[in-house]
Amino acid sequence: MRAKSLTEQARRAQIVSAAIETLADLGYGATSFKQIAARAGLSSTGLISYHFKGKQELVDEVYAEVRGKFAEFVLDRMDRSATAAGELRAFLSANLRFMRAHRSHMVALLQVRPYVSTADTADDDHRKMADLLREGQQRQEFRDFDADAMAIFVLALRNGVLARAADHAEVDLDLCERELITAVELATKRG
């Protein structure tokens, strides 16, 4: 398979960017190549078909693009704390700050997640969260609890806030960030 030229890479990036904005505005069900082409300023949907084999490949590319940007944003903010409790707080805060700074990306991610053909990373997210919680327990930062069960709860709380904020732009993300962090700290703190 031949390498894509810089022009082809730029066109693919343009299409993915337009797809993210279209998905965020219209939702998965109403998004079509026609709307994406119009948003990207393309003369026809054929240009999308030239660069992507079909909607599935474009959905997978949108997912990979946003997921990568999201992971980089969150991980960059987590590497600053020396404690597991600080890492957990930074993780939760970074998730909501990504939503605030990149709302279209987060909404698009939530829209396409059920439709991606690639392996979902939910199990990996759960494993990493459970490992962080176990680390906090070993350091005596967190109380005794089942780390796998607590990871389910923490991620469900986070996912719930993100889903609600995606559907309702008026959600106060600053307030949600404070309350989410407080709820998780109360659930995990020692003594």
Image: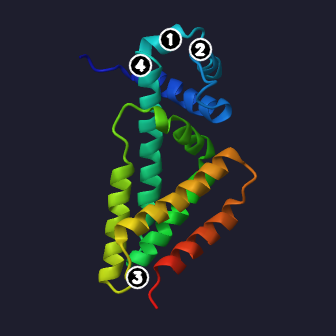
Of marks 4 and 2, which one's residue comes earlier in the chain? 4
Q: Which residue is mark 3?
A: 142
Q: Which residue is mark 2?
A: 42
Judging depth in this view, the residue of 56 and 6 nearest the camera is 56
How far is disc 1 from disc 3 in space, using C-alphas?
A: 53 Å
Q: Residue at x 43, y 11 (%)?
A: 50
In this image, 84 relative to 16: left or right? left
Q: Is residue 71 above or below residue 154?
A: above
How far is disc 4 from disc 1 in space, using C-alphas?
A: 10 Å
Q: Which residue is mark 1?
A: 47
Q: Disc number at residue 8?
A: 4
- Marks 2/1 in contact by CB < 8 Å: the verdict is yes
In this image, 142 relative to 171: left or right? left
How far is disc 4 from disc 3 in space, using C-alphas?
A: 50 Å
Q: Is residue 79 visible?
A: no
Q: Badge 2: few (under 14), some or many (20 or more) residues near its Cα, within 10 Å? A: some
Of marks 2 and 1, which one's residue comes earlier in the chain? 2
Q: Is residue 153 above or below residue 23?
A: below
Q: Position of residue 126 (x, y in %)?
A: 37, 58
